[in-house]
Image (tube, rainbow, N blue to C red):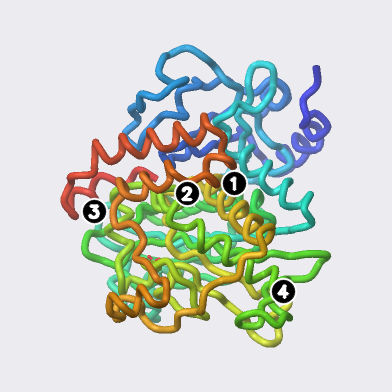
Amino acid sequence: MSSPGDDLVRPSRDRFEAAGVRALAMTMVDNGGITRVKAVPIARLERAATNGVGMAYIWAAAGTDDLFADVAPFDNPSGDMRLVPDLGAARILTAAPGWAWAPVDQLSQELEPVPACQRTALRRTVEAARAAGLELRATFEIEATLLDADGRPAHEGPGYSTTAFTLLEGFLLDLVEALEASGVEVEQFHPEYAPGQFEVSVAARDPLAAADTFVFMRTQMRFAARRHGFRVSFAPTALAGEVGNGCHAHLSAWRDGANLMQGGDGPAGMTDAGAAALAGVLEALPGLLAVLAPSPAAYLRLQPHHWAGAYACWGVENREAAVRFIPGTVTSRERSANFEVKVGDGGANPYLVMALLAAAAADGVDRGLAPPEPVQDDPSTLGRDELARRGITRLPTSLADATGLFEGSDLARRVLGDVLHGAFAAVRRRECETHGALGEEELADAYRWRY
Ligand code: GLU
Ligand code: MG
């Protein structure tokens, strides 16, 4: 039996050999949010692409501490899956000479997707939206904290300053060159607000490519940091008491080649369908928060005045709203108008984030939803009555609360299927049990190097 990627083996091998690649690193992201890797020498490329490499089935239940939640059907040590690299999405790991990278699909020994394959859930969702005439374009904006070998931040601010920039420029330049050499379209990069923090933004793609690119970029970032004597933390709160690392997801909905987020008579110049996509995401957001902000540490970050979007509302360029609508410059609007979901962080599984946001957007369009009035104020300054009158709610303030809403989310269950939905919730419950009672410093310490 042949595999879907068979015809890609020969061109991939030629491309890898021309680039001096000696081994292929293959990654999946589990329900804990950890990127797991298996590697093969290039001589084994064909076999890996045809048969996959083995991995225990129970990784679907793994938490950030490498221990497993007790949830069927992952509650016993039996069962194997095949990790099959998608060579169509492979890239040269230019920051680690000698290596290439590819994302994997998690298949059964019959080479069918296993129910817990997060990447398959995303592919399925994108295909369903496409079949309904809706294209989604997406990207993740990566914020991360750079620490030196002694755990000191690579800069002390001020935020966005040339002072910080001067200390980061060698690392940033090498990183961006490595990303571009591997085909990633970098849009901009800069030192961020908190000590040691930086950010890289890349062009929007289809949601599956966006999730793959996110995993690839973080791998490149780790290697580039190491070459400069740094380590990079993607934890939501790398340093207790500081503004955290977000991983904002940007989305736009398109139909027949036109960006629905602009050029219409709807709110803020959106078309009605574009506004419906935004409304679908906003409505689903509380039930999806456990996916976007999946650790107890995430809730240290998700606070008012942190530009992390602690309130379920949307606004035009409002950095305190969970959904920030970005109309874009008049000269680029047709291409660039989009909305940003601010609540996510680097502990999230990018495949699940994109699957659920894409499904929520498509659901909004399908149901013809209209968003509430935009919010342009800082919601935390509004009184209780005013919040209630305008239908603005605070998002859950703990992983336990967010998990309860996720368990009750019909959308999440429908998109992920019972097995993946159940395993993901069980991992969250375990994460609450193991880390939920920790103080701020302990939480930051527990998650700093997990993602
Ligand atoms: N660091 C902030 C966060 O936690 C975001 C800052 C910004 O808006 O870029 O999401
Ligand atoms: Mg930022």
Asked whether disc 1 touches disc 2, contact meaning CB atoms under 8 Å apart, the reply is: yes
Residue 88 screen position, x and y as percent? 74, 41
Residue at the disc numbered 3: 150
Residue at the disc numbered 1: 93
Residue 251 screen position, x and y as percent? 61, 63
Q: Secondary structure at mark 4?
A: helix
> Is tag 1's residue or tag 4's residue first in the polypeptide sequence?
1
How far is the residue under mark 4 from the one under mark 2? 32 Å
Q: Secondary structure at mark 2?
A: helix
> Is tag 4's residue or tag 3's residue first in the polypeptide sequence?
3
Task: Report which quarter residue 10 is drawn in.
Answer: top right
**Residue at 28% over, 79% down:** 383
How far is the residue under mark 2 from the one under mark 3? 18 Å
Amino acid at the residue labelled 4: Arg
Q: From the viewer's perspective, is residue 160 above or below residue 54? A: below
Q: From the viewer's perspective, is residue 208 above or below residue 373? A: above
Asked whether disc 1 touches disc 4, contact meaning CB atoms under 8 Å apart, the reply is: no
**Residue at 63% over, 20% down:** 108
269 left or right, relative to 154? right
Observer-nearest residue: 21 or 357? 357
Amino acid at the residue labelled 1: Leu
How far is the residue under mark 1 from the one under mark 4? 29 Å
Q: Nearer the viewer, mark 4 or mark 2?
A: 4
Amino acid at the residue labelled 2: Phe
How far is the residue under mark 1 from the one under mark 3? 27 Å
Where the C terminus falls, by quadrant? top left
Residue at the disc numbered 2: 223
Q: Secondary structure at mark 1?
A: loop
Beta carbon of the mark 2 residue lies under 8 A of ligand 2: no
Asked whether disc 4 touches disc 2, contact meaning CB atoms under 8 Å apart, the reply is: no
Beta carbon of the mark 4 residue lies under 8 A of ligand 2: no
Residue at the disc numbered 4: 335
